[in-house]
Image (cartoon, grey):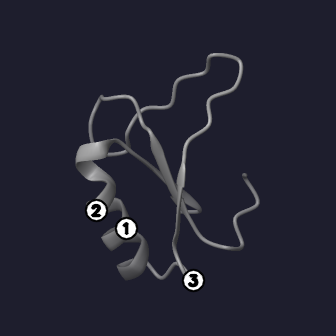
Amino acid sequence: MDEIMACQEHVEEALDDAVYGGFEMPILDQLLLVDNSIKKCSYCDKDAIYVVSNKHSTTR
C-alpha cells in the first residue's frame, strides 16, 4: 500500500500501520483536496484529512 487516508481519530493507527507494513520513513501530510474531491478514511466513513505515505510514493 503506497498511502493511507486517515481522519483525525485514526491518524495514529495509520502511522503505526505504515511503520509495521514496511513503509520506508512514513510521511504524514495534510490532505489537500482539489476539484472538491472527498477522500474517505481508510478505517471508517469519515472524511480523510491526512495522508500517510512513504518517500517513494508515485501517486502523489
Any mark on residue 32, and which?
Answer: none
Question: 32 above or below 14?
Answer: above
| Residue 54 rendering spot, x and y as whole percentages | 60, 71
Marks 1 and 3, how far apart at CA: 12 Å
At label 3, which amino acid type do we have? Glu
Of residue 49 and residue 58, the one placed in the foreground of this image is: 49
Question: Pointer 2: what residue?
Answer: 12
- Tag 3 residue: 24
Q: Where residue 59 sits in the image (x, y, percent)?
A: 72, 52
48 with respect to 58 (left or right): left
- The answer to whether marks 1 and 2 mark residues whose Cβ atoms lie closer than 8 Å is yes
Q: How far apart in space, not on screen, are marks 3 and 2 (Cα)?
A: 17 Å
Q: Is residue 14 above or below residue 43?
A: below
Which of the 4 image quadrants contains residue 47? top left
Q: Residue furthest right?
A: 58
Q: Earlier in the sequence, mark 3 or mark 2?
A: 2
